[in-house]
Image: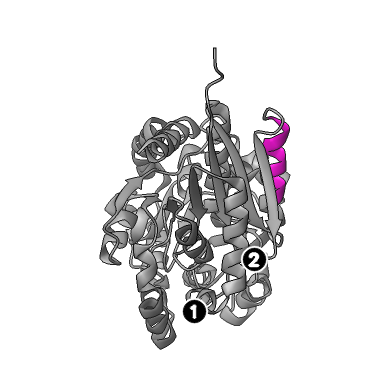
Amino acid sequence: MATPTRSRIVFYSDCTTFGGHEVMTLRGVKALLEDGDFDVHFIHSCDNQRLASGLAEIAKSSPQGKLQTTATAFRSRRFDALRVYAAKGRRKELAALLTTLKPDLLVIAQGDIESGCLAFFAARAIGLRCVSYIPLPHRLSDMGAGRLGTLHDIINAPLFQLPDAFITISEAMKRKLRDRGADQMIHVVFNGIDPGKFTPGDRDAERAALGLPPNVKIVGMAGRFEFGQKAQDVLLEAVAGTTDWHAAFIGEGWDGERLQNLPKELGIDESRVHILPWSEETERFYRAIDLLALPSRFEGFPLVMLESLCCGTPVFASDIDGMSEFLPRPCRFPKAEPAPLCEMLKRFDAKACTPVIERLREQVHLRMTHTSFATQFVNIIVRLTSS
């Protein structure tokens, strides 16, 4: 009997940072390998060490040879759509690599439509089907980039026509793709978390372990320190308008120094602000705080929102994107505005949040777990490779 032919899927990412989308991309890779009908080759930027480490961990638990990787010098930069037109050498180099790998499908893991766009042109050059796995199809002009953002949007508009299909992370993001001119098939696969890891726990014990003070109200944020998107500055301004709330942050990023200095500028006593180094055990942080805040200026469908709720910690968030799709209205406020968030902190009632958390946790357990994500992701790749 002939051995069944496995499909070869090549993933491509030239992003140099690591965040929630990279986490889900790795889970997609793992799901395909566990399915048994796929071999995977991942082309990634040599500057993204956390992505490389994640791939190495997956390779350890996979049959030998089923996951292979190539680190390249390619890295995403602003105005890459223009750079790619000029960089014939880079296009030819990637096209030659893809020709050698002979994939059945190319999956381009993109933070936004510009990152990874080199792979669109390389795939087109050799007639290879490709799908964009994208969480943020936003217009840059809507993300606070001003006139330069508008120019970016004009330059990037043709990119939305290049993939054969899209995979995105929420219905809100699907609508944004349509708004950007994408008329291809768009598949929605919600982000998924491990419900066995993110569970309620002992708040006092976790605070002691993390060095957070007992018997005070703490509002927290977890993730990349980036004011332009995540808006840690907005949370600190909201806390400055209260007398009893503390703010806690866990993460890393290029705005780390600004985050250290801002409390003094806002007149917040340093004893009320706690900045913790990034840890993979974020569940301990969620259990330790009273409330998670997401005052983001733009988002996709945040993993931290799902993780916090499953740990029994309520979430207040900007009324945008995936948060407006998932959270009830009393948990949302105008994006990046400290005054409404400050008022919500002053009125916060933990007991009143309990039934809301339970309803949301049920939704997460039904539709947004590792298992549900893996099933949907694999099914879509199967359809794309067989069509």
Q: Which residue is mark 1?
A: 82
Residue 346 in which image quadrant:
bottom left
Mark 1 lies on a secondary structure that is helix
Residue 328 located within the stretch drawn in magenta: no
Dot 1 amino acid type: Leu
Taking the spot 57% from the left edge, 74% from the top edge, the residue there is 88
- Image x and y of residue 298, in percent: 41, 66
Q: Which residue is mark 2?
A: 74
Dot 2 amino acid type: Phe
| Main secondary-structure element of the magenta-colored stretch | helix
| Up-down relation of residue 324 to residue 25 (above or below) | below
Q: Nearer the viewer, residue 236 or 368?
A: 368
What whole-number distance in Å separates the C-alpha atoms at marks 2 and 1?
A: 15 Å
Residue 199: in sight, yes or no?
Answer: no
Q: Nearer the viewer, residue 339 or 36?
A: 36
Mark 2, Cα crowd under 10 Å, few <14 / some 14-19 / many 20+, is some
Task: Give the magenta part as a residue range.
Answer: 52-61
